[in-house]
Image (cartoon, grey):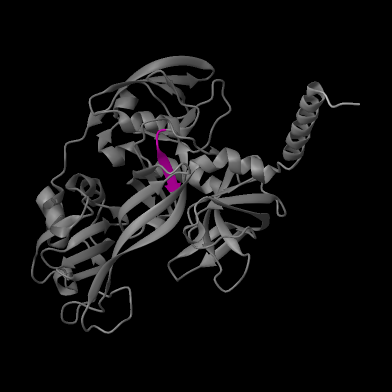
Amino acid sequence: MGVTAAGIVGALVCSAARAQDAAAQRITPAVRVFRECSPAVVNLSTTTIVTMQRRFGVESIFEDIFDLPAARPRSFKTNSVGSGFVIHEGGYIVTNAHVIDRASEIKVTFADGTELPAEEIARDRRHDLAVLKVDADRPLPFLRMGRSDDLMPGETVIAIGNPFGYQHTITTGIISALDRELRFSRDQVYSGLIQTDASINPGNSGGPLLNVLGELIGINTAIRGDAQNIGFAIPVDRLHDLLPAMLDIQRLRRVEFGIHFDSKEPRTNPPGIAIRSVDPGSPAHEAGVRAGDVVVGINDTATPRFMEAFSVLHHARPGNTLRLDLLRGGERSVRPVKMLAIPELDSAALMARRFGIHVRELNPADLRRRGLRRAIGLEVKSVEPGTQAAEAGLSAGDLITLFGGWPVTSLAALGPLIEQVNSGDLIPVHVLRIDGERLIRAELALQAK
């Protein structure tokens, strides 16, 4: 009996169907999660200036990061790799604070190869978290935030990151234990961590730990270098709790608005975010907004989660009137709230009065002269003799990059930080010295007058 064309076609169709069925059977939860979530995971490449110089200045307290002889100092740039993930389509990215620590430049690479420069928005060094922002020409894929108060030891987890620079690597494992503590020094202790045996290596830091539903349950942060398959992640509930304070629009933008959001998400219809407190006499208070109100929309944009509200506020300009769609006691109303600009502080004068340090902003010519692509700090113009800063070796030309743990690339950024300083406060200050071939980073603790 001869073979017909119809028979050949039928056999091919059956073979293709069997192949599809076999492929479908091989799709595990890990495969599904990787396909769904990897577009929202990013590679972070940071450029850091380091030096092989032990000290500068006679009897200076500045120490270099390498314990090497002081002869013939050599400076160079190093590139480090970490991970992060998008939490909002507007380009907001979460990573570990230590991933971007000391970075002069931050570059984000997506799964499709797109590379974008990133700007630091906020950093919480105590909890090892940071938020970055990239400007994309389209809405970005982002991860769904789950919860970490119901995690189960033995539960399957999935990590996606960039170990040793191998981009978008997936590893799987289980939750080995909960509420672990890591102590790096007397002053640096991470508690309440998730322990997992999913392989986490250098480069995974800042990447997501996911459950089998593809929900974010943790941020990979540390490993035990002397052990195998012992990794740790920050619970997602901690990120959820810290975001409203880290992204306080009044501090970031120096505006008067008056609303402080709660991290808890009330069960309302439509969903929204609760207001924890309202500053007395603020624009929000004058508009009738009260603690306990639930914001379900701003300027006709739904705000079911905090990041939607922050995205609208972050793009608003001082002087804009924002229409807040509120729920109170089951009743809905719209309240117009004006965002007011707070007059700029003379932060340079405050810095001089509190610490005896005179600073200024870097201009384009300064950046070109120093070989920098962007401002990374404030330049020290002079230091008053006899002050603690002078005794520590701080001098004209040094750059102050962090003040109290926050980046200070402008006088506007320094203003709200130094405004909160009281006499006697001990403030950690990060300093970078660029002097020809010598580049040195150091930390000081300066006491305010």
Q: Compared with residue 403, is residue 42 higher up or lower down, i.e. above or below?
A: above
Q: Compared with residue 411, is residue 50 higher up or lower down, i.e. above or below?
A: below
Q: Residue 407 placed where, x, y %?
A: 28, 52
* Residue found farthest to the right: 1
Q: Compared with residue 186, is residue 354 higher up or lower down, i.e. above or below?
A: above
Instruction: Please identify the dominant SS of the magenta region.
Output: strand
Range shown magenta? 90-94
Q: Residue 76 placed where, x, y %?
A: 26, 68
Looking at this view, is 171 or 349 the one in front?
171
Say which quadrant the N terminus sits in: top right
Q: Residue 384 placed where, x, y %?
A: 8, 66
Inspect this view and state whether residue 338 appears.
Answer: yes
Looking at this view, is 381 or 291 the one in front?
381
Q: Residue 110 placed where, x, y %?
A: 44, 44
Q: Residue at x 41, y 52 (%)?
A: 44
User: Does the segment drawn in magenta span residue 62?
Assistant: no
- The quadrant in which residue 29 appears is top right
- Describe residue 420's horizontal placement relative to residue 271 as left or right: left
Q: Compared with residue 442, is residue 60 higher up or lower down, i.e. above or below?
A: below
Q: Which residue is drawn at 16% across and 81% down?
A: 58
Looking at this view, is 301 or 83 the one in front?
83
Q: Residue at x 19, y 60 (%)?
A: 399
- Describe residue 297's horizontal placement relative to residue 21 as left or right: left
Inspect this view and state whether residue 126 appears.
Answer: no
- Describe residue 61's horizontal placement relative to residue 125 as left or right: left
- The quadrant in which residue 366 appears is bottom left
- The quadrant in which residue 17 appears is top right
